[in-house]
């Protein structure tokens, strides 16, 4: 699908879908628990469906019903042997977490995914699993790959280039027979590790960790319990109506955000406030207005890498210089988001300097519509749609259907808010 976008302004109220991070973690924990769990308000997307398929492949029973509540009967830690290669689609989070869980099995488990997933590095996690006793083989540290356990515990070390590597070990280690210690170097994306630790705490898992989240001691021989929970709204998705209001001068009410949740991308609301947007946080909704315009600022995005594409559009609109820095891991997401956003925004006339871990953007330059690529990356597709809303003329985004990875109703919701979108 191509998405045609013309200059437009948003106004109105919406509710954003559930968190992808929470949904996939919920599926993973439920799949290993002994008993039946209920996941209410899950995000229904390609990535979360990949997680449910992985859960079933390892022996869990999954009932999605009308998709408002997912019911999962876990395998109780008794992992079943998959019938074939586990296809993880485009879901890096699911690949990493279920690779860690599969390493608990006493037989080989193979993983693969789509073309994009085959570019997502796995070598760091595989090496860490090998230190715990697994045997791993892969295509030079990428999918397709095979893991044979069981990991039994002990000591392992890894670079925290992606927080998902750490999350995978934290979910698997409590199920090992022996105690485990984990040492992490250069940890990125700390809020995502905090989400994982919250899940483990709610499960009553016994572990100790350092204040900077780089050292862990985890007791072995533990288990997961069934649960009943409602998935929090996704702050990463909320970034898009937030930025849309800020750059088009509109006002949008987002009804279902919980700022007490650990999701790192809630910081984007503060980022936009610093740039000049007006944000009013109420008990049951948050209202964003961009009527006063925006000015450039410097931001550290290490904890909020998923926000980089949308923030790049905000920076291109804002008057003055903005720096989106300290986010090297943005280059190993679904795409190299620093390079891709730089290339595509330049097609619209934006002035951007690309650095190894940063984007330096001279904002306030009028943008002109053009044909742009999404690279089949959901966040790039939605961000370029935002850019089209402030550009003169027509912007056409290729493969825009990839937005469904995290925001299936993106086009429908934005049209309802007033965006000039046309799916072709």
Image: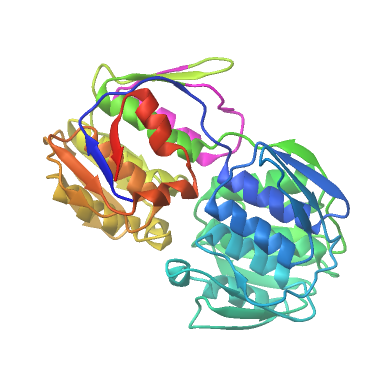
Residue at the (21%, 55%) spot, across then down: 343
Considering only vertical position in the picture, is 322 above or below 54?
above
- Near-viewer residue (367 or 303): 367
Considering only vertical position in the picture, is 220 above or below 188?
below
Query: Magenta stretch containing residue 165, yes or no?
Result: no
Spot occupied by residue 417 in the image (x, y as percentages of width and height): 37, 24
Considering only vertical position in the picture, is 297 above or below 403?
above
- Near-viewer residue (393 or 341): 393
Q: Is residue 82 left or right of residue 346?
A: right
Spot occupied by residue 147 in the image (x, y as percentages of width and height): 66, 79
Q: Is residue 90 left or right of residue 54?
A: left
Considering only vertical position in the picture, is 308 above or below 136?
above
Q: Is residue 49 left or right of residue 79?
A: left
Residue at the (54%, 36%) spot, across then down: 17
Residue at the (15%, 41%) spot, across then down: 369
The part of the image, by quadrant, that contains residue 300 is top left
Spot occupied by residue 249 in the image (x, y as percentages of width and height): 26, 20
How was this image coloured?
Answer: rainbow
- Near-viewer residue (292 or 73): 73
Residue at the (65%, 69%) spot, across then down: 99
Query: Magenta stretch containing residue 263, yes or no?
Result: yes
Residue range corresponding to the magenta coloring: 254-280
């Amino acid at each position: 699908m191509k998405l045609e976008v013309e200059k437009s302004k948003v106004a109105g109220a919406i509710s954003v879908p559930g968190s992808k991070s929470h949904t996939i973690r919920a599926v993973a924990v439920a799949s290993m628990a002994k008993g039946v769990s209920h996941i209410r308000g899950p995000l229904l997307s390609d990535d979360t469906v990949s997680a449910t398929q992985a859960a079933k492949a390892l022996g869990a029973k999954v009932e999605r019903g009308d998709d408002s509540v997912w019911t999962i009967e876990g395998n109780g830690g008794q992992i079943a042997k998959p019938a074939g290669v586990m296809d993880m689609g485009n879901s890096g989070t699911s690949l990493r977490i279920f690779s860690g869980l599969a390493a608990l099995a006493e037989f080989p488990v193979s993983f693969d995914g789509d073309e994009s997933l085959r570019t997502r590095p796995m070598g760091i996690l595989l090496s860490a699993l090998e230190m715990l006793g697994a045997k791993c083989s892969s295509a030079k540290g990428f999918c397709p790959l095979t893991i044979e356990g069981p990991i039994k515990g002990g000591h392992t070390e890894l670079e925290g280039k992606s927080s998902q590597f750490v999350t995978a070990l934290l979910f698997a280690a409590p199920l090992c027979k022996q105690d485990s210690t984990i040492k992490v170097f250069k940890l990125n994306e700390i809020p995502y590790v905090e989400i994982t630790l919250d899940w483990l705490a709610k499960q009553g898992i016994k572990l100790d960790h350092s204040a900077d989240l780089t050292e862990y001691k985890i007791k072995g021989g533990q288990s997961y319990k069934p649960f009943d929970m409602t998935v929090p709204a996704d702050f990463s998705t909320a970034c898009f109506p937030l930025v849309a209001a800020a750059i088009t001068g509109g006002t949008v009410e987002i009804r279902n955000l919980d700022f007490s949740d650990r999701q790192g991308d809630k910081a984007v609301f503060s980022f936009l406030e610093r740039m000049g947007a007006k944000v009013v946080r109420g008990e049951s909704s948050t209202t964003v207005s961009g009527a006063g315009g925006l000015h450039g600022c410097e931001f550290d995005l290490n904890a909020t890498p998923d926000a980089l594409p949308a923030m790049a559009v905000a920076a291109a609109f804002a008057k003055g210089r903005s720096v989106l820095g300290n986010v090297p891991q943005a280059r190993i997401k679904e795409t190299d988001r620093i390079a891709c956003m730089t290339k595509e925004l330049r097609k619209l006339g934006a002035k951007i300097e690309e650095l190894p871990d940063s984007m330096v953007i001279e904002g306030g330059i009028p943008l002109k519509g053009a044909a742009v690529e999404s690279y089949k990356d959901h966040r790039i597709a939605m961000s370029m749609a935002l850019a089209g809303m402030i550009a003169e003329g027509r912007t056409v985004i290729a493969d825009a259907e990839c937005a469904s990875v995290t925001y299936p109703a993106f086009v429908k919701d934005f049209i309802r808010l007033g965006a000039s979108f046309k799916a072709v």
